[in-house]
Image (spheres, rainbow, N blue to C red):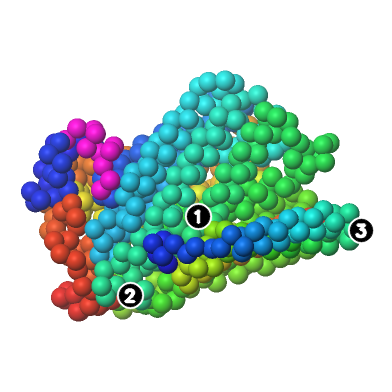
Amino acid sequence: MTEASHHIISYRKLTAVWGVLLLLTAATVVVTRLDLGPYKIVGALSIACFKAGLVIAVFMHMKYEGRLLRTLLFIALVTLAIFIGFTFFDVLYR
Amino acid sequence: MNSSEYSPATPSSFWNDTGSSGITAWIFSTDHKRIGLLYFWSVLSFFLVAVVLGLLLRIELMAPGRTIMGPETYNALFTVHGAIMVFLFIIPGFPGAFGNLVMPIQIGARDVSFPRLNLFSWWLYMIGAAVIITALFTGGGAPDTGWTFYVPFSARSGTNVSLAVFGVFIVGFSSIVTGVNFVTTIHRLRAPGMSWDRLPLFVWSLYATAWVQILATPILGITLLLIIAERVLGVGLFDPVKGGDPVMYQHLFWIYSHPAVYIMILPAMGVISEIIPVFSRKPVFGYKMIAFSSIAIAAAGSLVWGHHMFTSGISDRAILIFSFLTFVVAIPSAIKVFNWVSTLYRGSISLEAPMLYALSFIILFSIGGLTGLILGAAATDIHVHDTHFVVGHFHYVIFGGSGFALFGAMHYWLPKFYGRRYAEKPAVVAWGLMFVGFNITYFTMMVLGMKGMPRRYYDYLPEFAPLNLVATVGSWILAVGLVLMLVNLIRGLRGGEPVGDNPWGGATLEWTVPSPPPTENFPEEPVVTHGPYDFSKSGMP
């Protein structure tokens, strides 16, 4: 919970995460070229969520934070996901 | 705002802490009480401006045809009335003013977690307000889009929409900052013994509100910037010709602006939950359910925005889901109403001004809430959408609900911070005038809407004339009551009878400190040993 704990992440790990992010970016491009209909957006958003999760967990050190802060952030992200998801009830079925 | 005009009862009060009575002792102060009062007088000033605009709108509608203004002026006036009332008065009104004044004391803290950020939020609010006001008198003049800034009109209107929405954008930041501050404060700064189940219900409601402020306001910010992008760059996000979707704007706008209704009403419900047990001399009925229902309203209320768009061409499936969820919100709202009524049952009720406002809140909010269900049911909404019924409904919830709760809070808490109180009799007369005037004005509007009178037109068919006259006369009664209330309140705060620490016999922590409170609120950190409505353990009869 305290910033003073300053968890230090190794270069190896940071580079690995960066590599995964690049791969996922490539995956996003691939997904947009597949003919998946409305699932295209689901695929693209899922990959984007996973990437954002990695950035938050590792680069933003949320993995090493206390439970309260993680819960609060989780609530915020779930809310955003619901906002986007509910909008699709309209867009997909219009 | 000039502290030298007041003579606070105790020399150690926060009024005397700086040794300076100049304006800088206020506008650069990080004391939550001073910031609360800054906010209070700021929002009240904007409220009065918007009241005058509202009265002018009613005068225009007094008779068919042109009465005192043309259609362009009318459009600008209802836009500015709505934008000021929503963004500059009632959204910052509770968290900014009474949240800041009362919440830290209620949880036994010396201040909020981030006092400088707190001052910054007031500055953001004032800067945003200044930008909005500038927008009214520069460029193409006051926006004429309605406070919702709907595209495509807002993207094309020749009026000064860009600057006005930028002002609202800045005010939104102020709201987010307050939300972050309150969530942190309520988590971190509670006094020993102030467990979550001893938190006053006003604090619970501010906590739920703060989450809505944090989670929903950024979406408004983005949406407003997109309007500017649309106007300045012509990006076409909302323009079907360029592959955009105008209904997407409505989604984005209401994702914030419906939860914003809960930013307005939740703390108001918190105020009512404070006043009713104190003036019934009885512990609140169903404490946990009232606290839980605040969170439930905030959560469920964030998922109902689509009910503003039933006639906008959204999918039937979306209408079904949003309509269902709208009815779900009625459940926690009803939990609160039933709990308040149960608290009153067999209580020793004392009908003083704060209680009168609280009781009228229950009635007016219930009318507003139930008429909301008429709008939330898709079939009936088709008939009354964009009629005066919506205007009446909205004012019942936000003016009859939040507004009356704010007036109640002013009578309940301001004597605490000024050390002096208002005269009771004029306060009751003012309440009576407002209650009568309010119902004449807005109930008539709902009837007009049912008969088919659309909103946002400066003219109407002759058959609507008699009821419009009634509504306008009602607005004058309301205005007379409002002026009487404010004159009595301000006179009382300046030179009224001094009040003791606990004039109402409340059991929450703000009544344990002197009136007005000292700068750091408590001489030493309080230890909380009983619940917020446990009158017997707090030494009350």
Q: CA distance from mark 2 to mark 1?
A: 23 Å
Q: Is residue B19 visible?
A: yes
At label 2, the amino acid type is Ser
The 10 Å Cα crowd at callout 3, few under 14, some 14 to 19, many 20 or more, is few
Expressed as whole percent of the image width and height from the top left, the position of residue B244 reads: 78, 42
Q: Quadrant of residue B29?
A: top left
At label 1, the amino acid type is Ile
**Residue at image coords 71%, 61%:** A20
Question: Which residue is disc 1 drawn over?
Answer: B214
In this image, A29 relative to B496: left or right? Answer: right
Which is nearer the eye, B13 or B375?
B13
In this image, B84 relative to B477: left or right? Answer: right
Range covered by the magenta-colored residues: B21-31
Q: Compared with residue B507, is residue B384 higher up or lower down, i.e. above or below?
A: above
The chain ID associated with circle 2 is B
Q: Tell me the quarter of the image containing the N terminus of chain B.
A: top left
Question: Which residue is disc 2 drawn over?
Answer: B195
> Nearer the viewer's eye, disc 2 or disc 3?
3
Question: Which residue is disc 3 drawn over?
Answer: A35
Farthest residue in the left direction?
A: B11
**Residue at image coords 47%, 64%:** A7
At label 3, the amino acid type is Asp
Instruction: Name the main secondary structure of what is drawn in magenta.
Output: loop
